[in-house]
Image (cartoon, rainbow, N blue to C red):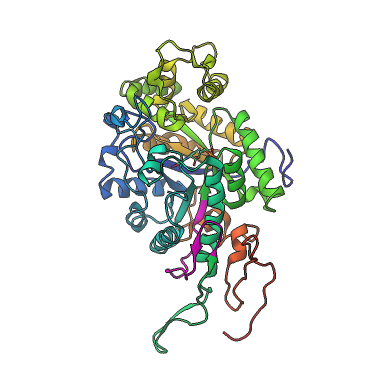
Amino acid sequence: MELNGKSNGKAHNKQLILNAFVMNTPGHLSPGLWKHPRNHTEQYKKLGFWTDLAQLLDKAGFHAMFIADTLGPYDVYKGPHNFEPGLAAGAQFPVNDPLYLVPAMAAVTKSLIFGVTASTTYDKPYALARRFSTVDHLSDGRVAWNIVTSYLESAARNHGLETQIEHDFRYVLAHEYMDVLYKLWESSWRDDAVVADRKAGTYATAGRVRNIEHKGKYFTVPGAHICEPSPQRTPLLFQAGTSGAGRSFGAKHAEAIFVGGQTPEKVRASVDSIRQLARDEFGRDPYHVKIIAGISLIVAETDEAAQEKQQDLLKYGDREGALTLFGGWTGVDLAQYTDDEDFQFSDKPGIRSVVNRWAETVPGTENLKWNKGRIVDFLLLGGMMPKIVGGPQKIADELERWAEVADVDGFNLSHITNPGSFEDIIEFVIPELRKRGLFRTKVPEGITAREQVFGQPGLLSDHYGSKFRWAAGEDAPRYLADDLEPAPKRRKVNGN
Ligand SMILES: Cc1cc2nc3c(=O)[nH]c(=O)nc-3n(C[C@H](O)[C@H](O)[C@H](O)COP(=O)(O)O)c2cc1C
């Protein structure tokens, strides 16, 4: 596909975005590895663990720390409602709230962006708007929101529902949710509402703050945003959705989208589809959606040393933890199957399609049987992420190939040990990427997340949410009753 003048192949003379993918839990994507000597995630409750990690990443030039989150335990395996098999591995349970980490990490770093996951299904929009504005203020605009609609039955049950809201309907709700947020973040306070004029005794100016009067199909929020505009107003928006509804949501709202997939050739199809949707359905420059692929690296000074490292890491894997994560992600309880069952031929279409995707694409597994043991082997290090094992040259070659073939803008790098994996990436991968001109050498300091990625603190003019902005010297945008979008015309006002 030809998009915006950029063709297949070398769309990527640009520099890569590198994020560290973490979670506020002992066992994110590598169950059991918390025991490894180079891992300290059992310290996740200590601020010092997070401030050290943030400084390590910041100094190395990483763009963001991306913090995943879930809102209930993984309790499908050996279930129903059984979280015990995952306890030994700390498999994403226990898990603390990610947002509280940000102000402390922001205080000791200069550039790192903090991408925090929060759910449109379980958080109320008025409260979420306030939490993110608060942290955007305290981090001088370095917060991003990873918008998720959530996927766990346990989260639904513990938030007062009998079962999850139907998948596509979660996205219908999420669209209106975003309208509420743009109104609060962009439209409730005029840019120059806060004057903090000591002499006049005026903190904020009457007439420049308004109630949003949102009365939609699913949400009613009549009042004004309770926070004054933060440096970015709307935090930089991340999202990861692979379904049709998820992709369409991302193409409209997201400024960065996380994609999964085992090979760059397969991922390319998703990337093209997202960029095309952004352009054709939502009138955006398709490259105003940064696409970030999830990936897991095992790296050492040579290819052989990296293979040895992989064998060492595998010794720490917790197989019950892997089956627990699989149960949570897919809803399938593998305890119900024998060890021999080859899931490529399963009568359960859900699991058959997941496993066949892996069987077709996971390198080196072409002639192997995809039974329970193989699934566990695959998931132990880095979960479902594609894995690259090698020395600096091989890793850099592969990342370069991914960027070109898949047309992605960067990578969400998961860890196997933390901080071990990131230390290795900093020692072996980043210097090689820099040598090739693929990673930034100068890291801008003291600017917002959006300025780092798009050159300005506010939403770009082709982003849907930008139309909600109440700019200095203008009338507040009005909303059309039928679809909640702001009316296109705005009148310049004189005076205040
Ligand atoms: C790299 C990546 C990170 C994700 N992080 C989270 C997360 O932290 N919390 C969450 O609830 N879902 C997370 N997801 C899941 C997505 O939000 C989404 O539910 C999933 O990709 C399925 O997409 P769909 O809902 O459009 O089917 C992540 C997905 C990817 C690919």
Q: Residue sitting at 63 percent across and 34 percent down? A: 268
Q: Which residue: 61% across, 39% down?
A: 244
Image height of 258 relative to 331, above or below: below
Left or right, 206 with respect to 486, comes to left
User: Does any portion of residue 292 appear in the rendered image?
Assistant: no
Question: In the image, is residue 371 part of the stretch drawn in magenta?
Answer: no
Residue 326 appears left or right of 101: right
Q: Is residue 24 visible?
A: yes
- Quadrant where the C terminus sits is bottom right
Question: Which residue is farthest front?
Answer: 162
Tell me the residue at 27%/31% (across/down).
87
With respect to residue 377, does 56 lie above or below?
A: below
Q: Is residue 347 left or right of residue 322?
A: right
Q: Position of residue 243 (x, y in %)?
A: 58, 38
Query: Residue 481 location in percent, x, y?
Result: 64, 65
Depth check, front residue: 339 or 299 = 339
Q: Quadrant of the N terminus?
A: top right
- Residue 185: x %, y % from top left: 50, 64
- For the image, the number of numbered tags is 0
**Rendered image quadrant of residue 341:** top left
| Most common SS among magenta residues | loop
Q: Is 346 placed above or below 69 here? A: above
Q: Position of residue 191 (x, y in %)?
A: 53, 73
Magenta region, residue range: 215-237
Q: Residue at x 38, y 62 (%)?
A: 138
Whether residue 220 is in magenta: the answer is yes
Q: Is residue 313 left or right of residue 283?
A: left
